[in-house]
Amino acid sequence: MADSKARTALLQGSLDLLILRTLAAGAQHGYAIAKHVYRASDEFLSVEEGSLYPALHRLERRGWVASEWGTSESNRRAKYYQLTPKGKKQLQVETDAWLEMSRAIDRVLNYRPAEA
């Protein structure tokens, strides 16, 4: 249970980045985004609808993602999301920030004090 909560907290903090990165490959509907994150993470990260759609709407309000209705591969009506030019720039900002943060965390995890 604690592992699941830790995973959820980590995902919440990086969900925007994961969505932007997923959409860099092209327009996708919500279910396809969630499925991509799950598969690309070797089935470690599971994005629930209750987190995904509010995040997509937030990204859309910020102008990083645009949406339009279309037909899914199962012939159902679906809303497709795609990166905007502003979103592509933000993807780079978010990626750089994530890499800097992960390097800092790695340094802390591997810190060995100098012997006196």
Image: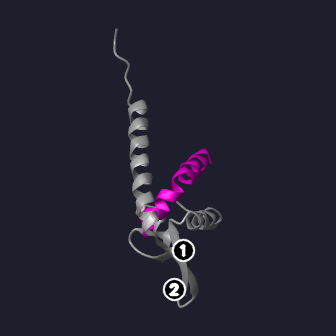
Instruction: Evaluate if marks 1 and 2 touch, with contact meaning CB atoms under 8 Å apart.
Output: yes
Asked whether 31 or 19 is in front, the reply is 19
Residue appearing at x 38%, y 71% in the figure:
25
Disc 1 residue type (three-letter): Tyr
Q: Give percent across and percent down for residue 100.
A: 40, 42
Is residue 87 at all visible to an observer of this figure?
yes
Q: Quadrant of residue 40?
A: bottom left
SS for tag 1? helix
* Residue at image mark 1: 31
Asked whether 57 or 37 is in front, the reply is 57
Q: Magenta includes 26?
A: no
Q: Magenta includes 8?
A: yes
Residue appearing at x 38%, y 30% in the figure:
110
Q: Judge whether 68 appears above or below 25 on screen.
A: below
SS for tag 2? loop
105 relative position to 67: left or right: left
Q: Main secondary structure of the magenta part?
A: helix
* Residue at image mark 2: 72
Please rate how many residues cluster around mark 2, counting C-alpha atoms within 10 Å: few if below 14, some from 14 to 19, many from 20.
some
Point out the tag, 1 or 2, that comes first from the N-terminus. Answer: 1
Residue appearing at x 39%, y 26% in the figure:
111
Q: Judge whether 29 appears above or below 111 on screen.
A: below
Disc 2 residue type (three-letter): Ser
Q: Which residue sits furthest bottom?
A: 75
Residue appearing at x 57%, y 88% in the figure:
76
Q: Give percent across and percent down for residue 87.
A: 46, 64
**For residue 99, which numbered disc appears in the image?**
none
Q: Which residues are magenta?
A: 1-23
Asked whether 87 or 114 is in front, the reply is 87
Q: Give percent across and percent down for residue 101.
A: 43, 41
Q: Give percent across and percent down for residue 95.
A: 40, 53
